[in-house]
Image (cartoon, helix red, strand yellow):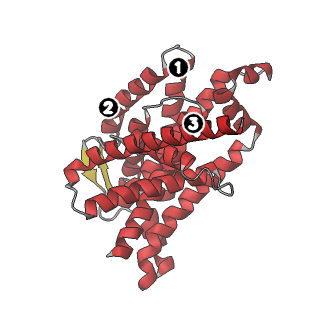
Amino acid sequence: MIEGLIIGILEQGFIYGIMAMGVYITYTILDFPDLSVDGTFPLGIAVCFIMLNNGLNPWLALIAAFIAGSIAGVFTGILNVKLRIRNLLCGILTMTALYSVNYGIVGKASAFLDMNSKTIFSQTAFLFGKGYFAIYSKLAVILVIALAAKFALDWYMRTKSGFLLRSVGDNEGLVITLAKNPGTIKIIGLAIANGLVALSGAVYCQYGKAFNVGSGTGTVVMGLAAVIIGTTVFKKLKFLRITTGVLLGMIVYKACISIALTLGLPSQNTNLMITVLFILTLILNEFLLKKKKSGVKKNA
């Protein structure tokens, strides 16, 4: 039972960890409160769901979901950069619009995949056989996808475009002096971030084999909590990249939720638990920041 619980925590932790890396781009790098995440996560589920039900390649469905999420991110960026709408409102508008889009893609509020639909897990199950290691088959596939997304993001951040993306959040004037348009860089960042969120939704679709139009509710809160945990608790481990910390942060977050449910917390109180955990994470973050500032003053 304990082994199954741990495997479940790791599986969901890595799935949502992909989403958290997208939130890390908007929240930490761009300093952009992008609430469209609550819409792009189910967008990835919807795109993947309809492709699988039509017998298309499940790996291709992941790519299609990433592209769909990126388009949604571009839309959010255009609202902010071109139409000068406040960033918070841009996310709300995109999230609201995507509710109807996601419903329209699937045609109903909730549905289950056809029994004969192929998934990335059914296609790779033969690699692990039918023995003891079969229980790790899903975890292994999810881990590979999460690490691929992490390493791709790490690589991108070391490129010239990635450097400009980091500069937009820290020092927009520097980007201008380099004769680059900070608005365009911001749109690119939002596209990558929402693409990762939708990719996470697509993996979740094949994991849970279901679609629900409201499945994105609270996604941004989970992502923010994982980012804060990853950038505070694991920040002192210098050998870990921030993206690794974010993945671990989501695993810690999911572990807290799973343990609470195992100890008897009613499932209908999950959202309350998520809120409490997020508040505690913010308090911890504020405490560590004050402690750091006081340490700097003492050294001075």
| Front disc: 1 or 2 | 1
Tell me where residue 254 sits by quadrant. Answer: bottom left
Residue picked out by circle 2: 100
Residue picked out by circle 3: 28
What is the CA distance from the residue labelled 1 to the residue labelled 3?
Answer: 18 Å
Q: Earlier in the sequence, mark 2 or mark 3?
A: 3
**Crowding near the residue tagged with mark 3, few <14, some 14–19, many ≥20 C-alpha atoms within 10 Å:** some
| 148 shown above or below 289 | below
Q: Element under label 2?
A: helix
Q: Residue at x 48, y 17 (%)?
A: 86
Where residue 300 is drawn, which disc sits there?
none
Q: Residue at x 32, y 31 (%)?
A: 100
- The kind of residue on which mark 3 rests is Thr
| 200 shown above or below 115 | above
Residue picked out by circle 1: 80
**Crowding near the residue tagged with mark 1, few <14, some 14–19, many ≥20 C-alpha atoms within 10 Å:** many
Q: Earlier in the sequence, mark 1 or mark 3?
A: 3
